[in-house]
Amino acid sequence: MNREMTEKKRLQKIGLLALVTVMLLGLIVGCTQNNNSGPPAGGNTNGAAAEDNGDNGGSSSDTEPLKFSYSRPTWGPATYTKGGAYEKELFKQGNVDIDVRIIPVVDYDATIKTTAAGGNMPDVIWGKGPVDPFWKDMQDQGGFLKINEYLDQFPAVKDAVPAGIWDKMADDKGDIYFIPNLIYPIVPFFINYRADIFEELGIAEPTSVAELEAALEKIKESGKGIVPMTHGNTIPFWAAKDLGTSFGTTSGWAPSKEDPNKIVPPEMQEEHLDFKFWLQDLKKRGLFDEEAGVNPDASFGETKFKAGRAAVILGGNLQSLYIDLKKNEPNADIKIMPPLTGPDGQQGGTRVVFPQDRGFYVNVKAKDKAAKFFEFLNWSLTTGSDFRRYGIEGKTYTVDPEGRKVPIPDEEREADYKAAQIEPLKFLDPMSEKLDWEAQELNFIGAGIQDKFEYFKSMFEKYAATPYNDFKDPTVMSPTNAEIGPQIWEDYMAKVDGSILTDMNLTKEAYKEARQKWLDAGQQKIIDEFNELQTNKSEPNYVD
């Protein structure tokens, strides 16, 4: 069955999700939903004591608040301040007192490793979980609390995550330590463009990589003084993941051309290198943002696009892009390019993601707080669900004549109720909310752009029609990789792979020379181990 037929079949079955997955499209649409190119931006609270059956719970005035420390990354601006009105309402309704520490996502891994080395881990800690060697090692060393008994005690928490995902989180003894942050596996990073500029310059909507290049050349030569193409709030190559599919790259492990029974990492795939060095060439020619790969502020591209200083953006939150752009350019319009046909005729689509993007652990030293913490999560998924999803009427949402809770756009909220004050207090959203078109439509209504919703949905379906999967099971661990993988990457590959967009003299040949040294230093053994340990190398299916 070809890709298009397969994905159409998958989309028909979305309502029957059992084993699926970041957060639909938070980077793309939702102010109050989880976001896949980053986590949630909407209203969320948590709760107090649940009843013995685990189905209910609420604030309890006759008990002391549950006090715990909490560390997590933030995908938006790191402007959270403690003591705000939203936080106070959460603490009151949830009977909690949370000492939250936020870290920008681009700095999170390095910062938390330093924190761990100093022995100062908080009670609840966001991390990558057992799919990552660092976190798996900490888990195996006894740093985190086993949670099986709490999942059995609090069914709403257990039911929020599909059984197949819990199975992936379990170790070889069946023990679970990690609560995954779920994401929907299909998270298109659209190629958004200024339709008004394209019309002004007489540029038809591109349908191929070659036509995109020609359009960027025309924009550069137009004398308008704007950046032809920039990228959204993440690293450049990931922001461009769906453009990469037009080159045939999954941006992940895929079957080897030499031996289809083996899978190899993206660094070993010619299509992946072609894509990365194509972006380098665009940058050399002034067609891709000169700050890409250089500016440590991940939001610089969105800032430019919203200010009217860029014509095309890879990824980005369509809703906020449109609203903020219109403030600066009242006559501006944004459209989405369809998945592009690649240089070799490859049909572009979307890079499908594993249905978990980070999540959180409970520190083993916080065992005495664990039961109340899980009560708190359970409450947020039951009687506290409306507060978790929508927040506070008149502050984060309004009720329309049909009784629907319509989110108030972030830019129209009071400071204490903006996403930056809510995201740091997010925990767990159930899988059932990850592809909720009704909720997404309400976001568009709240933003005053409901006329764009059907268009947006249709473009989502076009990207989703051709999925590109990472063939590697992220829960399979190579012993050699756990031992030396990060070090040999740092020694041989980090510089060249991280320099493609900063060193315009770096060639594909020099990249391959470094890659060979990497393989010789132990990476080939790691690849062989992964292939030996992962017995099922078929293309994964996270939707059916």
Image (spheres, grey):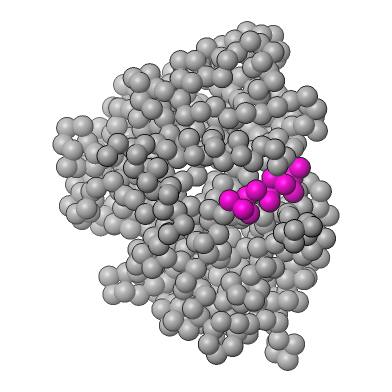
Residue 25 at x, y = what percent? 56, 46
Q: Is residue 487 among the parts visible in the rendering?
A: no
Residue 96 at x, y = what percent? 68, 77
Q: Closer to the camera, 405 or 510?
A: 405
- Image side of residue 157 versus residue 61, left or right: left
Residue 314 at x, y = what percent? 56, 31
Q: Closer to the camera, 375 or 339?
A: 339
Asked where in the image residue 28 lies, by quadrant, the reply is top right
Task: Tell me which residue sits at (65%, 63%) in the image.
Answer: 389
Q: Is residue 40 among the parts visible in the rendering?
A: yes
Q: Is residue 258 a member of the stretch shown in magenta?
A: no
Q: How many marks?
A: 0
Q: Is residue 442 a member of the stretch shown in magenta?
A: yes
Asked where in the image residue 391 lies, by quadrant, the reply is bottom right
Q: Which residues lie in the magenta part?
A: 437-448
Task: Look at the picture and state if 458 lies above or below 182.
Answer: above
Q: Closer to the camera, 124 or 411?
A: 411
Locate the N terminus by quadrant: top left
View extreme (front): residue: 402
Task: Look at the picture and state if 372 lies above or below 253.
Answer: below
Main secondary structure found in the magenta portion: helix
Asked where in the image residue 393 lies, by quadrant, the reply is bottom right
Residue 182 at x, y = what percent? 49, 59
Task: Look at the picture and state if 513 lies above or below 492.
Answer: above
